[in-house]
Image (cartoon, grey):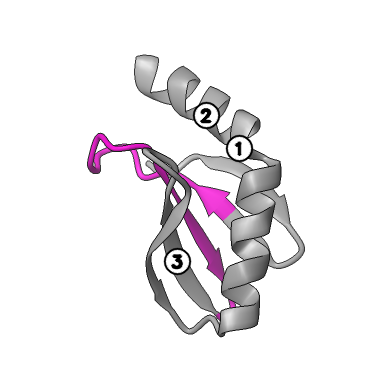
Amino acid sequence: MSPTVFKEKNYRFFFFSREERRMHIHIISPDGEAKFWIEPKIELAKSVGFNNKQIKMLENIIKDTEDEIRSSWQKHFRS
């Protein structure tokens, strides 16, 4: 199960239900995929296919939606 937290442009931001416990978010689009840590700070964990401009844009989106991501994480993994 990989619930979608939100979509922006061609990017889907989501979690994998049975993965590591450290808070993070996955992003996928036709261009590639990435994983960002949310804790202890927002930083890129890995990326395939995205260029530096896209990575910076994704990081900014995550920073702007950090509260929504954290809330969705807590709601999803609490159950």
Q: Quadrant of the C terminus?
A: top left
The residue beneath circle 2 is 70
Q: Is residue 12 left or right of residue 21?
A: right
User: Is 24 placed above or below 34 here?
Assistant: above
Q: Give the percent coordinates (x, y) of residue 54.
A: 63, 75
Whether the residues at callouts 2 and 1 have beta carbons within 8 Å, the answer is: yes
Q: Magenta residues, as a range?
A: 13-31
User: Is 17 placed above or below 31 here?
Assistant: above
Does the rendering let one see residue 79? no
Q: Mark 2 and mark 3: span between their CA atoms?
A: 18 Å
Q: Give the percent coordinates (x, y) of residue 70.
A: 52, 29
Q: Relative to the observer, which residue lies in front, 78 or 2?
A: 78
Does the rendering let one see residue 43? yes
Q: Mark 1 and mark 3: span between their CA atoms?
A: 16 Å
The amino acid type, in three-letter code, at marker 3 is Ala
Quadrant of the image occupied by residue 53: bottom right
> Going 68% across and 67% down the picture, which residue do you hit?
57
The residue beneath circle 1 is 66
Q: Relative to the observer, which residue lies in front, 13 or 57?
A: 57
The residue beneath circle 3 is 34
- Report the number of discs: 3
Q: Secondary structure at mark 3?
A: strand
Q: Relative to the observer, which residue lies in front, 30 or 63?
A: 63
Labels 1, 3: front one: 1
Q: Which mark is residue 25?
A: none
